[in-house]
Amino acid sequence: MSKTDLAVADGLVVGIYYTLTIDNEVVDSNRKGGKPLVYLAGTNSIVAGLEKALVGKVKNDHVEVSISPEEGYGEHNEAAVETVPRSAFPENAPIEVGSRFIASDEAGNQIPTLVTAVDGDDITVDHNHPLAGQTLNFDITIAGVREATEEEQQHGHVHGPGGHEH
C-alpha cells in the first residue's frame, strides 16, 4: 500500500469485483468481463455486513466474507407473504407461480413481489427480498477507491463516467 492509496471509508467512491455464493452455488458475479460495481461508501448502497467488511481496504485488496441474514437482506418475514385478489394486478397480466411484479405501498415505495401460489382469484405473493434469510458469501477484490465529486456527495450516489446519470 502506498501513501497515496485511499482506504475504503464513508464518503469515498469504491469499485469492487465480486462473486456471491450461497450454499457453494454462484448467485451473482461481475468478474468475467464485467465492470466493477461502484458505490458511495456510507450510503447503504450495499448490504450492511459487506460495507463493514470493506472499510479500511485499498485497491487490489482481496476479501472473503460471510454475511448473516441480519446484516444482509434480513430474515425471511412471514408477515411479508400475503394473499391478494387477482384484481390487485394489472388487467391481462400473466399471473403464474414465479411471476415477478413491482407493487407500491401507501407511500409510493416500490416493493418487488414474487407470486408463490395461484388458487383461482386468490394470489399468494411474497414481498421479501429473494435473498432474505440467506447467508451471503462474498469473494471481493477492491478495484479502486477515489474521492467522490461534490455532486456525488450532494446526491448520495455515484455518477457515471460522463457525469450525472440517473
Image: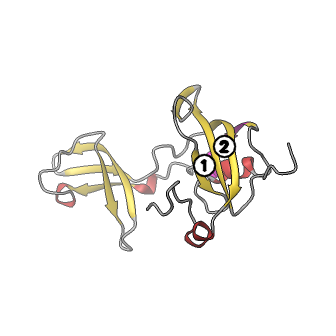
Q: Is residue 147 left or right of residue 82?
A: right
Q: Is residue 1 left or right of residue 16?
A: right
Q: Which residues are magenta?
A: 63-71
- Residue that carries the numbered disc 1 in the rendered image: 72
- Residue that carries the numbered disc 2 in the rendered image: 67
Q: Point out the image quarter for the N terminus.
A: top right
> x, y (%) of residue 137?
64, 35
Point out the tag, 1 or 2, that comes first from the N-terminus.
2
Return the residue nearer the eye: 21 or 118.
21
Element under disc 1: loop
> x, y (%) of residue 65?
71, 38
Tell me the CA gap for discs 1 and 2.
6 Å
Give the total of numbered labels.
Answer: 2
- Name which quarter of the figure residue 29 lies in: top right
Is the Cβ of the residue at disc 1 closer than 8 Å to that at disc 2? yes
> x, y (%) of residue 68?
65, 44
User: Within 10 angstroms of label 2, few (less than 14), some, or many (20 or more) residues?
Assistant: some
Return the residue nearer the eye: 82 or 142.
142
> x, y (%) of residue 28?
51, 35
